[in-house]
Image: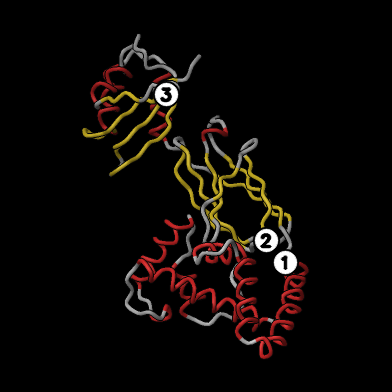
Amino acid sequence: MKESALILFDRLKDAVARRFLKENPASSKDYKHWKGDDIARFQEDLLQKVKGRVSEKWFYTYFKNTPDKLPRIDILNLLSAYAGYQNWADFKQKNLKASVKQNPKKNRFLIKSLFLSLIVLASGFYLMRPAKKQVRFCLNSLTSETDEQIHVSLILPDESEKNLTLNNHCVVFSTGLDEVQLRITSPYYVDKLIKRKIPYSDYTETIDLHPDLIALLLQHYSQSDTNDWQKRRKRLQKFIADSAMIFQQLPQKEGIELFDKQEFIDQLCIPTGWLRNMEILEIVYRNSKIIKLRFRIKKD
């Protein structure tokens, strides 16, 4: 059962290698001897041709070594499309037909066994698939920022990150993985990457977020008045780099407006200035100073 499926997978790897070598150089015609540069070119060609990607670790596991199991079905579909087939099912069907035409007597028993094996294999995958776990992460913050200003994504192995929706500062999702990674970003909080074991089926955890004090101070300055404008100006001079790129995101499709450091500080230090209710969209630091700031003015 397993052996028959892996034989087909070996044929798919051969087809993938032939497809790659048609347009790309390699240190060897045998994919098992490909080096780091060859693998990098293959990853780039795969991304360009079928908009998919496999990691270098995955390549070593399934191409340079002899695996004892098939990859996930989405990866099999991806490689089949790269080799010129619709999907893994199309590849299996056409390669089984080719085997029959080449030597029907020799392969009749193998095909029958393979067909039965695939049925058993599919049934086994269905019955033995990992149970889904319900996972809930809630974010504990010290500010009153809305969910729209906090971005949470689930990092999946060999796949693109999946954006999660916050509802009342919590994300809820199902997974068959025993370990998950989350990336949390926000203009008003320090970025956070967490990695957690999921030991049971109903997992809940609260994650503390640490506020970005400079971003919060900028927002406070845009919403408040003061009698000590010189003190405010000195603080702004201190934590904004001289070469900082500062953009205002204009409404809809009107584009952006660019400010230098002094123009931006002047606007924040004029009591009647138009720079009110500023909402930070992006902030980047270098050596504890702002080098890039993108913001917009919230409507009243």
**Disc 3, disc 2: CB below 8 Å?**
no
Where residue 18 sits: x, y (%)? 43, 73
Please give the name of the residue rendered at 49% of the width and 77% of the height, measured from the top-left corner. Answer: 14
- SS for tag 3? loop
Task: Give the image location of residue 192, x and y in percent.
Answer: 48, 48
**Residue at 35 percent of width and 75 percent of height:** 35
Mark 1 belongs to which amino acid? Arg
Q: Are marks 3 and 1 in contact (CB under 8 Å)?
A: no
* Cα distance in 3D space between marks 2 and 1: 8 Å
- Amino acid marked by disc 2: Gly
Residue ranking furthest to the front? 101
Of badges 3 and 2, the one in the foreground is 3
Nearest the eye: 241 or 128: 128
The residue pinned by badge 2 equals: 176
Q: Residues within 10 Å of mark 3 (few under 14, many from 20)?
A: few
Q: Residues within 10 Å of mark 2 (few under 14, many from 20)?
A: some
Mark 3 or mark 1: whose residue is earlier in sequence: 1
Q: Which residue is mark 3?
A: 253
Residues under numbered marks 2 and 1 in contact, where contact means CB atoms less than 8 Å apart: yes
- Indicate the quadrant where residue 295 lies: top left
Of callouts 3 and 2, the N-terminal one: 2
- Residue 287 % position (x, y): 28, 44
Is residue 76 left or right of 281 when viewed as pictured?
Answer: right
**Residue 295 circle label:** none
Q: Nearer the viewer, mark 3 or mark 1?
A: 3
**Residue for point 52% across, 61% down:** 158
Please tell me whether mark 2 sits on a helix, a strand or a loop.
loop
Coordinates of residue 46 in the picture (x, y in percent): 44, 61
Amino acid type, residue under disc 3 in the picture: Lys
Report the front residue among 2 and 137: 2
Residue linked to disc 1: 129
In front: mark 2 or mark 1? Answer: 1
